[in-house]
Image (tube, grey):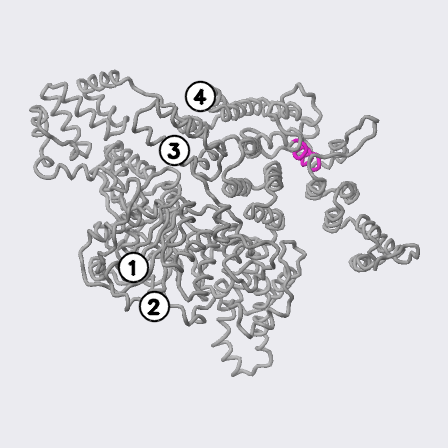
Amino acid sequence: VSRAKPEDDEYWNSSKFKAFTFDDDDDEFSRLKESKRAVNSILVDDDDDEEEEDGVERVSWSGEPVGSISWSVKETASSIRSGSEQSFPKIDTTPSLSKQGSGYSLSSLFKGDLYDLSPEETVRRMQKGRAFSLEKFRSLQDKLLLLDEAVAVYDGNLITAVLIYLKKSLSKEILFRELMARDVALRHYVHYLKEMGEQKLLVDVHILLMQYKEHLNIKDEGQRRDFLKSCLGLPFSQDDATHVQDHYTLLERQIIIEASDKKADAEIFKKFPRKASILNMPIITTLYYSCFYHYGESEGTYSSPENIRKTFRISEKQYILTALGARAKLKSWFDVDSLFNTKNWLGYTKKRSPIGFHRVVDILQKNSAPVNVLQEYVNLIDSPELKLSVALKYKCHDIVINTYRDLKDRQELVVYREKLERDSPEYRKIQELLNNVQIRWKN
Amino acid sequence: MAHTEWKDAPGLPDFSLLKRLARDQLIFLLEQLPGKKDLFIDADLMSPLDRIANVTILKFCLYTSSLKYTYFLFFFCRLCFLIRPRIQTVKWISDLVNADKVAGRFRRYKIIFTPQKFYACETVLEEQGVYGDVTTDEWNFYILPLDDDILSLELPEFFRDNFLEGDQRWVTTAGSALRLLQSVYGSFSKVYGIGRCAKMVYESWRELMEDGEQRTRQPEFAKVFLVDRDVDFVTPLCSQVVYEGLVDDLFRIKCGSVEFGPDVTSSDKSIKVMLNSQDKVFSEIRNEHFSNVFGFLSQKAKNLQTAYDKRRGMDIQQMKAFVADELKGLKQEHRLLSLHIGASESMMKKKTKQDFQELLKTEHSLLEGFEIRECITYIEEHINRQVSMIDSLRLLCLLSITENGLLSKDYRSLKAQYLQSYGIEHLLTFANLRQLGLLEEQQAGETLTVMESKVGKLVNDKTVGKLTDAFSSLAKKSNFRALSKRLALVPKSGEEYDLRVPRDMAYVFSGAYIPLSCKLIEQVLERDGWTGMEEVTRMLNGQEFAVTGGSSSSEARSKTDAQRIVLVMFLGGCTFSEISALRFLGKERGTYYVKQME
């Protein structure tokens, strides 16, 4: 899209610039919808559709014809090899930009005759205490020949030296497999490991987390729980220790809940069969689950919302949000109602919420609450502007009409009337208001 | 955005040559293995390979299949594996070979590593006792051209390996990629860069060039800008609102193509579509702010209708001409149009559902440093309601980076709530993000030094160095606020921004923020170096450089088109928003930007 092409000017100018919103009643969006309908309804004969290439490559194993294979890579490579301009300067590089000291560079030290020695010759040099190299023994067969040669000369020192090299370059399984058939070498190896004191446990945060991470590989939940229990002893930071402890407690509870709910036959389980097991779900999902299936249970049971709330120190706000979602899903408007009820010292009930009531309305609406329920909560929104915009969004006519009436905004009322169905109660209500001579309209 | 409109812009070199080179080398390697063979291809090499080769060239290997998903039907006694150099894959192959040995089957094995082999992989072969049974080779497939102006290394692990694990294994790969470009298209006139990895890549490339043989000088091809992803973490954390960026955020563009599901195609099947400049509809909307896309598509649909309507009242001759000349083009456009309209509609639905507007508002407040408490409350509610895990994390990171870390109290509480909502195993995620400097707890400067000196007494010199590194990375600040002020990244609020006529690169974020990375590139190119930006580089933790290719005649240079081609290489990946911003910059300055990403 070229932004300033003259022929487009008319189009761009024809619609006034308007702040863009992602609301779906946006004009342009509805226009787009129309276009979609239009485009899709254009009828075209589909006869030649198949062969149409379309310019859009498909991801498939077919396509362009093959270039000549004979055009060998070597040729290409040499013809394009560059005139490199060597004039770029070295830049002052801070830490270490030296080439990685990989095994390659090491082996280059041993070029020449040292590097080409046979197992016998190598072992001889080792015996004589002269420079030697084991690096060229890379295939399993060569390694074993070297080991056998070392064993053959009865030199324990050499056997261990070769074994250290083998330990470095062979996996434990393969090395042990081969050592099983070589008694002498095996004894040397076991002794060497004993002397080395096997494992050193590094106390490092990342090692700790690596250990903790292991639990992800355990499928069986009982084993997983036991593993997590074993993690409790690890020296985590105080903060992380709490989380790991929570993780263990959570899984422990989930296993208990799962076992009893699997065979539960209460009404609620029949009406809303469980879609998945609760095992390994996050804490909040577990809380939601318990608000859904175990609402109102006494705090003493593991599955009760109260118990979960206390055990995992869940904030009031979080609790209300979760319980609200679960109870609204079940359409238990009474429960929803009592979530927000507080009694003041005079005994009056008052609605109070740690989350904004517009948020509450939002959640209720997403759970398809009826208009009368919605309306009640829309009315509780503090800010008048917010209240109006929410009421407009969810079509709470009464609130919209009353707000405009209070604002004495006749024009908005007229506009709103046009959006309503003729002769609906709301329509008539506006009509009455507009005819009311008592009201002093501001416009 | 037809390129021809910008007469000023230089032509881009033909990058498809790179495909041909890679393909020829692959054929060469495969031809070196005599006889028929089973060819196994690493799953994530399938798409890149598909871009450069096809079944016909591989047909002499009767059976091809993608590695991770297949279990085996062996036809031949020769197996060839085309893989990325990953230890896991090599282990898996070793197991296979060892299983064959146990079963007494005799076969030949060959591994072709791409883009190069690693010693560690060979050591695995050695460890598993199959070295020698398995031979290895390298296929130096460094660069995949994804579009006229986008090149990619297609190494998704680059970021993790380099920035999280601190493993520099890909540095030489990036250096080799630069060398390849230079040897095919001509030398670079100037190299700028910022970041530790960028510096290493430059050095690695320079040494490769010095090792190479000297030949006659080639005409100059481009300037190069190397930038580490961790120089600018803010930009990739922002929700994308240009069309291509949105498509990527919602449908994931992989290797230049996207899979649109049934909700887009309004049928029961998904289709994979290539997204590049070949797609005429897409190429016109890819860089546009989403708000302009509807209007454009509607207009396009109207035009299409008119074009079809021309058929009415045509006589036979005219109809014949219409079918011959126009119909095919129209139909193609028709199909593309319905696809992109479908995509826009589906994006709209998804975004409306998740209160996108509010999310954007929070992001903009964070960028501006405005009403931070409200932002924290919003993020908290986002977490509490268990809405998109990734979005919550993105917001947390954005908060941390723009605020130089979270207050201890906030960090702990948000982390605890996050773990409650999305699972405690995300402890690991938090550890990783902390390591990267993406999500941190504010540390008082003094406590650090005290801790350092205390710990320093307990350990030997070598570890002290490491510890100091660790501490300094902890103390490393993003300085976003100061940077933003100095570089004027966030336009003053209250000013109206007409997204239809963008005045700067901020349009890619609804006029609320100019991507830091792109702003740096713009400034450095304008100044031809870092002079005058000392304070900025200091806040970005230094590591900047600008070097000229020495002796070449400066007169000839300034004239050539090539001078105006700029190759920007993002080490660790880049977003489509950044690409759009650079395209915008390129048009304004009559310059071409070629991007390269990992």
Q: What element does badge 3 sit on?
A: helix
Q: Does B367 appear above or below A441? A: above
Q: Chain of mark 2?
A: B
Res. B260 in view: no
Q: Name the residue type under label 2.
A: Asp
Task: Name which of mark 3 and mark 1 comes first in the sequence.
Answer: 1
Please report the residue visible at 46 percent of the width from the left and 23 percent of the height from the top.
A236
- The residue singled out by tag 4 in the image is A235
Q: CA distance from mark 4 to mark 1?
A: 53 Å
Chain under callout 4: A
Q: Is the same chain shared between marks 2 and 4?
A: no
Question: Which residue is label 3 attached to?
Answer: B470
Q: Is residue A9 above or below residue B57?
A: below
Q: Give the label, 2 or 4, closer to the camera.
A: 2
- Disc 1 target residue: B188
Distance from label 3 to label 4 (Cα)?
20 Å
Residue B561 is marked as 2
- In three-dimensional space, the C-alpha distance between marks 3 and 1, rounded to whole angstroms, equals 36 Å
- Distance, label 2 to label 3, CA atoms, is 46 Å
* Vertical side of B332 occupied by A358: above or below: above
- x and y percentages locating residue B298 in the rendered image: 60, 65
